[in-house]
Amino acid sequence: MSAGTLALTTALVYLAFSELGAFWAHNFATRPIVVCPILGLILGDAATGLALGASLELLFMGITNIGGSIPSDVFLAGTIVTALCIGTNLDYETAVVLAAAIGAVSAIWSLTVRIVYQGMFVTIFERLAAKGDVKGYNRMAILANATNPIFSTILVYAAIGLGADALQGILASIPAFILDGLSVAAGMMPAIGLGLLMNMLWSGKASIYFFFGFAATVYLNINMTFMVVIAVFITLMQVYNELDLRDRLKAVSGSSSGEEDDLFG
């Protein structure tokens, strides 16, 4: 696949997912675990897309927009890295490290575009709101959301179309020991992402499940897919137990109030 075809295909996929996320599925449709496998399937290498999607989701799932912080643009990073990894035979470990850098830089780009471009519509929205023009307001909201991803789509096209050949030359000139170091760093990054998530969600009650999963995976050699199945069943058991307990408490409170009514009625 030529660099131009690769860039155009990836840019169209990015634009399609951007519109899907903006109008129907919020930001969950643009997560790496969704975008990377589908993009890989379209580019002819679903296995690489799935592997990258899982790794990047582990890396970025603990990164959230809290207060005034600028989180990494995981959508832009995952799209570009997946296309480069498939189209230029970029090493998988290097791709994961590259995604972290692209995510941090592209976050600034995305924020700048939102501030500058969407800020242009503020006065228009204020004027329509002052007139009470609901239909015009709705049309302008659709237009603003539909056209906002165009700038990042152009960036995706340029990054892949102009950077694919250059990236191959750069990778060929990098010494082997640096690439080995990147491979080691790539192995650590998913653990860092998982650590960031656990830092927010960690609790004493939930820790038993973490240590159970770790022990079962390491010492019993249980397949990770089977561990997910076990986790689903444990979750369902917890949910049903809580629902059953809630029903019992309602029944007890209902009978108690009925007895009080009989006593004082």
Image: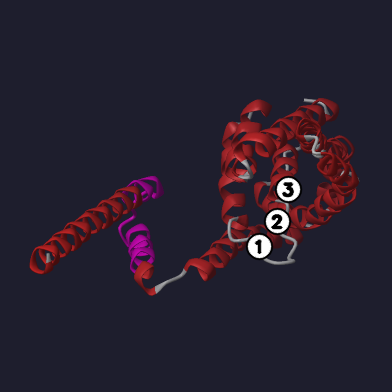
Q: Is residue 129 magenta?
A: no
Q: Which mark is residue 77?
A: 3
For badge 3, the amino acid type reads: Ala
Q: Label 1 belongs to which residue?
A: 185
Asked if the stretch drawn in magenta spans residue 213, the answer is yes
Please, is residue 247 above or below residue 6 in the view? below
Amino acid on which disc 2 is placed: Val
Which circle marks residue 97 in the picture? 2
Q: Name the quadrant of the C terminus.
A: bottom left
Label 1 and label 3: CA atoms lie apart by: 17 Å
Mark on residue 67? Answer: none
- Answer left or right for 170 relative to 185: right
Expressed as whole percent of the image width and height from the top left, the position of residue 229 reads: 34, 46
Q: Which residues are magenta?
A: 208-230
The image shows residue 84 at horizontal and vertical percentages of: 75, 40
- Point out the frontmost of discs 3 and 2: 3
